[in-house]
């Protein structure tokens, strides 16, 4: 049973009894139910103000009439206070139902099948070839990963796309550099680092020797024309970059369904360009082809440069269309930093002008920047923090903390991996995504703060309590012993979990899950401090164990949904 619905049904019955037929759906009543900030005002409050007009009675009178006629076992008390109807759920019943529901649904608790039959395409991570995976790509990777998991949890088919940045004149320069100074074995062994070195050298030498640029252009032309040698080197650069990136993806447990990147759309842009022309949207501007967006307060979308070259947005138009045709999505998300806000506004506007109603299903899931200890990260200043370095450092630091805190732990390496990565991912997903983040080790790895390690530790604590109870005789739980405010606070959070997840999906906001996990961990730790679990009285013990088990299960699920593992011992 879900209390909100049950309370809403009681209200509806009482409304009919008191005022005859009323034109209001139970869902609308459930949606109007509030959770008072203070339990002294009840578990739910129903404001009667909106009904006042239709029923031609004062809110106070409505609340009084309803309070008189509601009598249900699961409701301990109903009070009419200043136009509000305050419901106090019977605490023992509440505990029994909340824990019963959570534990009987197990891993599916919090889910429903609202996404069944629907498809979401998620464009995330979308790294650039021949560039190292730096901390700037952490948020898109982890927000996207979490959104994939959340959608699948609700039954969606989720297609994860890594829209590789694998097109542009820089790749011609890289081949030119490679042909001049590179060799196969060095690049194969050094990976992306070697490619970056070649590229940097090329740009330095091109300043002295402009002929190099022509060489670069010539190689790019060869890639465009499908010259076998150019393509072979280019594709090899791609596979080397992806091999490097996959190490990071493997560490983080991130997977994609498609790596169709910018170059994939080379042969899919002409139809779009023709269509723009046919629809009268393309206009010439100093030799270039643009879509004018002045009317919507935006600079024009540049579709073709005067030399005929296509642009980032041209590829994105082709990609959007391709994704619609291929996956027939109900929702298409682009998890990309807010620096590209304008780009996506332009993209969606052009799709709208083309008459594609499904532009409404496209959404830019934007997010803020990550700085590191107060320093912004910029490739030019050479202060880039590479993601795999950061992750390995996190694991090493977690290893040292574990060594100190739990010297006897088995699988210290495995736990350090889970905790180190958890710290970074959790930190990244803790704030509202639009906020800029300043990463510091002290805050990410603090076992007592609002961190991944703290939540993981709480989960491990719950596991440890349950392990201790394994040999103990089972008894019938006495739910009345969960009436204290600490137990009730824990259960209120458990009850909210499904709604939190729904909002997180609807708003594309994993941080709601991250924050929830901290709230639940804190509430459980207070409960644990106030209430001994392994008491002698079997009914109390059994009830507290059930609560502990539900917390363990929900914390584990919450962590999974944000892409963080939950070790059972720490
Ligand atoms: N590769 C781009 C970058 O690193 C992100 C691509 C985002 N996806 C897209 N369809 N435009 O900034």
Image (spheres, rainbow, N blue to C red):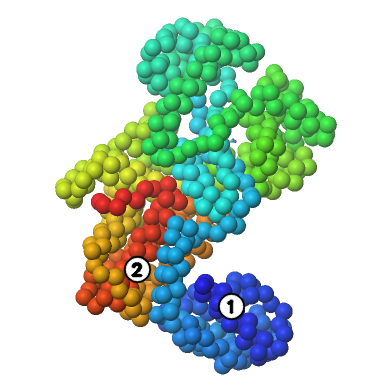
Q: Residue shown at 47%/27% (left/top)?
A: 242
Relative to 471, 103 lies left or right = right
| Residue hosting label 1 | 8
Question: Which residue occupies the foreground of this view, 264 or 397?
Answer: 264
Q: Quadrant location of ligand 1? A: top right
Query: Is mark 2 in CB contact (under 8 Å) with mark 1?
Result: no
Question: Which residue occupies the foreground of this view, 333 or 312?
Answer: 333
Answer above or below: position of 165 versus 550.
above
Where disc 1 sits, the SS reads helix
The image quadrant that residue 204 belongs to is top left
Circle nearer the N terminus (2, 1): 1
The answer to whether the residue bearing label 1 lies less than 8 angstroms from the nearest atom of ligand 1 is: no
| Residue hosting label 2 | 546
Relative to 6, 385 lies left or right = left
Where disc 2 sits, the SS reads helix
The image quadrant that residue 166 belongs to is top right
Relative to 48, 37 lies left or right = left
Residue 432 showing in the rendered view: yes
Answer above or below: position of 335 versus 553.
above
Q: Residue shown at 29%/48% (left/top)?
A: 445
Residue 427 showing in the rendered view: no
Answer above or below: position of 343 versus 529.
above
The image quadrant that residue 469 belongs to is bottom left
Answer above or below: position of 188 versus 377.
above
**Label 2 Cα neighbours within 10 Å, binned few <14 / some 14-19 / many ≥20:** many
The image position of residue 197, as x and y in percent, is 41, 18
The image position of residue 186, as x and y in percent, is 38, 13
């Amino acid at each position: 049973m879900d209390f909100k619905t049950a309370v809403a049904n009681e209200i509806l019955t009482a409304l009919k009894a008191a005022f005859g037929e009323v034109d209001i759906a139970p869902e609308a009543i459930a949606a109007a139910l509030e959770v008072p900030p203070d339990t002294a005002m009840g578990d739910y409050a129903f404001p009667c103000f909106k009904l006042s007009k239709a029923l031609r009675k004062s809110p106070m009178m409505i609340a009084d009439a309803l309070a008189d006629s509601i009598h249900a076992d699961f409701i301990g008390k109903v009070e009419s206070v200043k136009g509000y109807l305050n419901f106090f759920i019977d605490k023992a019943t509440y505990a029994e139902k909340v824990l019963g529901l959570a534990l009987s649904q197990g891993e599916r608790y919090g889910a429903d099948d609202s996404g069944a039959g629907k498809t979401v395409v998620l464009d995330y991570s979308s790294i650039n070839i021949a560039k190292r995976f730096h901390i700037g790509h952490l948020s898109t990777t982890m927000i996207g990963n979490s959104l994939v998991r959340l959608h699948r949890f609700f039954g969606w088919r989720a297609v994860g796309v890594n829209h590789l940045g694998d097109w542009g004149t820089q790749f011609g320069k890289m081949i030119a550099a490679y042909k001049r100074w590179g060799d196969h074995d060095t690049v194969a062994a050094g990976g992306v680092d070697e490619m970056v070195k070649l590229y940097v050298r090329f740009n330095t030498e091109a300043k002295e020797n402009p002929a190099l640029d022509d060489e670069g252009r010539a190689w790019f032309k060869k890639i465009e024309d499908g010259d076998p040698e150019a393509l072979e080197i280019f594709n090899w650069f791609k596979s080397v970059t992806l091999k490097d990136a996959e190490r990071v993806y493997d560490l983080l447990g991130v997977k994609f369904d498609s790596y169709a990147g910018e170059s994939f759309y080379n042969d899919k842009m002409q139809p779009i360009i023709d269509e723009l022309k046919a629809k009268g949207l393309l206009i010439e501007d100093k030799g270039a082809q643009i879509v004018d967006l002045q009317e919507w307060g935006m600079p024009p979308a540049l579709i073709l440069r005067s030399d005929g070259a296509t642009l980032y947005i041209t590829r994105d138009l082709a990609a959007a269309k391709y994704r619609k045709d291929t996956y027939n999505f109900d929702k298409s998300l682009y998890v990309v930093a807010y620096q590209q806000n304008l780009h996506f506004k332009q993209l969606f506007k052009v799709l709208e002008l083309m008459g594609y109603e499904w532009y409404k299903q496209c959404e830019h899931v934007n997010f803020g920047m990550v700085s590191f200890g107060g320093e912004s990260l910029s490739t030019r200043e050479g202060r880039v923090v590479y993601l795999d370095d950061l992750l390995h450092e996190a694991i090493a630091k977690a290893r040292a903390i574990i060594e100190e805190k739990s010297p006897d732990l088995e699988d210290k390496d495995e736990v350090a991996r889970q905790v180190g990565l958890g710290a970074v991912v959790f930190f990244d997903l803790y704030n509202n995504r639009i906020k800029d983040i300043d990463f510091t080790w002290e805050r990410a790895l603090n076992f007592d703060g609002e961190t991944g390690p703290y939540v993981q530790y709480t989960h491990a604590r719950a596991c440890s309590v349950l392990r201790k109870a394994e040999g103990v005789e089972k008894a019938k739980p006495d739910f009345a012993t969960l009436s204290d405010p600490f137990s009730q606070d824990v259960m209120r959070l458990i009850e909210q979990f499904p709604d939190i997840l729904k909002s997180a999906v609807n708003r594309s906001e994993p941080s709601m899950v991250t924050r929830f996990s901290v709230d639940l961990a804190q509430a459980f730790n207070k409960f644990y401090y106030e209430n001994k679990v392994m008491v002698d009285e079997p009914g109390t013990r059994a009830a507290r164990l059930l609560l502990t088990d539900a917390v363990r299960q929900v914390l584990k699920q919450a962590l999974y949904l944000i892409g963080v593992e939950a070790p059972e011992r720490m």
